[in-house]
Structure formats: structure tokens, C-alpha cells
Image: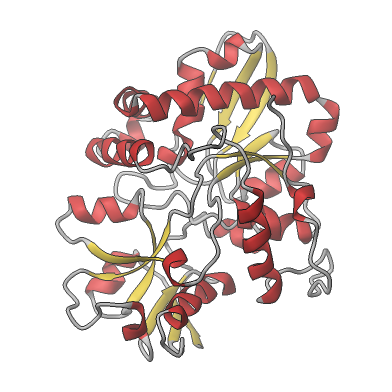
Amino acid sequence: MRHHTHSRPPARRLIAAAAALAAGALALVGCAAPGASGSGTDTAGSDSGAGAPVRFALDWAPNTNHIGVYVAEAEGFFADAGLDVEILPYGSTPASQLVSAGEADFGIGGQSGVQMARTSGLDVVSVYSVTQTDTGRLVVLGSRDDLTRPKDLDGLVFGGFGAPLFGALAQTTIQGDGGSGEFEEVVLDTGAYEALSQGRIDFTLSVATWENLQMEIDGHPYRAWRYQDFGVPEQQSTGIISSDAYLDAHPKEARAFVEAVARGYALAAEDPERAADILIAANPDTLGTAEELVRRSAKLMAEDGYLVAKGREIGAVDPAAWDAFGAFLFDGGFLTDSEGKPVTEEPDWSEYYAELRG
């Protein structure tokens, strides 16, 4: 790959959250789609003052990755658990850093983000897996008839987000389709669709449960490929994190929080329409103009196995996914220690998540 960076910072970052990637919080999660900008995020939480205080940090503007948390708040599941939860609005500091520093007790943080951040010395640990599979996709404009499969992207221009892992996901997907994986990479300084439609880039990464749906709604659907269909290991791309410090000091509250969150996501899986109503009502400023997107996303996540995996308790970790994607990160040289040096021994990934239920 060849790299080029625009002079302005990227206006759109993914996962799982891309602003958090520098601190290891890759998520390929919530994104800056129309109606969901990072500014003006509503702050929710109980006003009663009753219960143990808990601070929860978002990774982006409210979206359906967060739906179970808002459901748990609105339906009184947190109150039932003896908790007074404050949902902190997204700011410039990644959730992983807030949690590690003790400025938030929980936050959004996907699997690969935890694997990178904890290895680099941040005090973060996964306590709940929101999405059971990877929501990330490699995408091109649906109107590009010359780009029908990943290997067609060889030699073209990739719109990245400033972190090496994004390019590696694209490269591995292309190589898995028989291509060389050689392309030019630029860091986006506009929205991805704008850059694609203007012909400044040929392909980028997107989120199947949010951005891809927005493009369908707008009448400009992407052509998308799932990384895992071309050799990239599976990952639980969105989750909830805490810290060892918080878990050690507040074991009762931590278990209560995770149980309440699980109830929230279970309701979202069973009744996505009701859950979408709750999410929109809690965030009228950011989601009031994105009702169709929220409803379609909630339905997709509920019906396509994102929230619940067959044979696994809702929110439970998939150890095989952590091991496989962890090996991908280690083999690719994406893991560094607290001094920024590449790690020479693959971590024990079972130490990166905590089972708080049961």
C-alpha cells in the first residue's frame, strides 16, 4: 500500500470508532451518518439521585450500537438494579481513555480496541459483547460496474481513517479474493460517500448496520463485502468495557450494571420497534431526523444475529473470535506495549475479558 494524508483531519471515523483507534479502541462502530453528528449529543440518566452512581461513556453520537443502554435506562432496569446511570455525551477523548483514567466506569469499546488498548497499557477490560459478529464492510459505490469483487480494487485509491489496521482489513480482504492488495491510501477529510461520489477515492470501509443503511435510504447503496468472507478472522466488533480498578472496587455494581444492560439489549432483540422508539425519544436532537435509519438498523441488528448468537448467552464473549482476531493483530504487528514498542509474545486473550454474569 502507498499512503497519502490530506492536510485536514478526517471528518468521519468509524468503530468500531476510529478516533479511539489511536488509543486502541477500534470499533468500526457508530459513525457520523446524517442525523448523527458528534455534536449536540443528549446526556441521559436518572434524575432521582437514588442508587449507586455509574458513569457510562459513549464512543460516538447515539446510535443503535448503544440501544440496549438507553432501553435499560428508560425501562427502569438500571433503577431496578440499584444504579443511577449517567450516559456521558461523546467528546474528543476516546471512551477507552476515560475508562482507563477512572473518569467513566463503563463505556463502548469493541473487541479489537480492547485487544490493542490493554496491550498498550490502558486499564480496560471487556464486560459485554454488544455485536456478536463484525459489522464492518469493505464498500464501493453501487454504481461502479467495474468493481464487482474485492480483487478489482488492486491499484485503486482507498479512503482510510488514519490507523494502519483499517488498511490491513482492506488489504487482507482483497488478497483473500486473489488480488495483490496493493493500493494507494488517503486519509479522508470529508464524509466517505462524498469522497466516493466525487471520485477522489474508489473504496473505503463502512458499517453494515448504520452507514450502509443510510446509503440505501438515500438511494445510493454501496456494494459491500464482508471481511470474513475473504479470510479476515471474526470479531465481536462492538462491546462494553470497564476497568480492572472499577471491577475490583465495585464488583456488586459491575455485575448489576451488566445484568441490566443485558436486559436492555434482550428487549431490543425481541422488540426492535419499541427499542427504536426509546432510542429516538432519548436523543431527539441527534436522531429525530433519522427515524427511518434508526428503525431499519434496530430491525437489522435484531433479526440478523448481531445482538444474539445461537447457542450463546446474549452479550457473552466468543473466546474463539478473541483468539483468532488477536492472532491477526499480533501477526500483523498492530500490538504495541506501553512504551510503543511491538510486543514479541502474543498475549493471553482470556485476560482481556471478564464474565460478570451467571
Whether 56 is drawn above or below 1: the answer is above
Instruction: Look at 55% across and 64% down and name the residue there.
Output: 233
The answer to whether residue 322 is above or below residue 176 is above
The x and y percentages for residue 278 are: 37, 23
Residue at 27% in and 35% down: 295
Q: How is the image coloured?
A: secondary structure
Question: Which of the 4 image quarters holds residue 283?
Answer: top left
Please state which of residues 251 and 46 is positioned toward the viewer in this rendering.
251
State the count of labels. 0
Any part of residue 20 in sight: yes
Left-right relation of 346 to 302: right
Asked whether residue 43 appears in the rendered view, the answer is no
Report x, y in % for residue 1: 50, 88
Q: Indicate left or right for 272 with 45 as reference.
A: left
Q: Where 174 sits versus 41, above or below?
A: below
Q: Residue 325 appears in which quarter of the rendering?
A: bottom right
Q: Position of residue 50 (x, y in %)?
A: 65, 8
Q: Position of residue 329 (x, y in %)?
A: 66, 68
In the image, what residue occupies the spot 65% across and 29% down?
Answer: 55
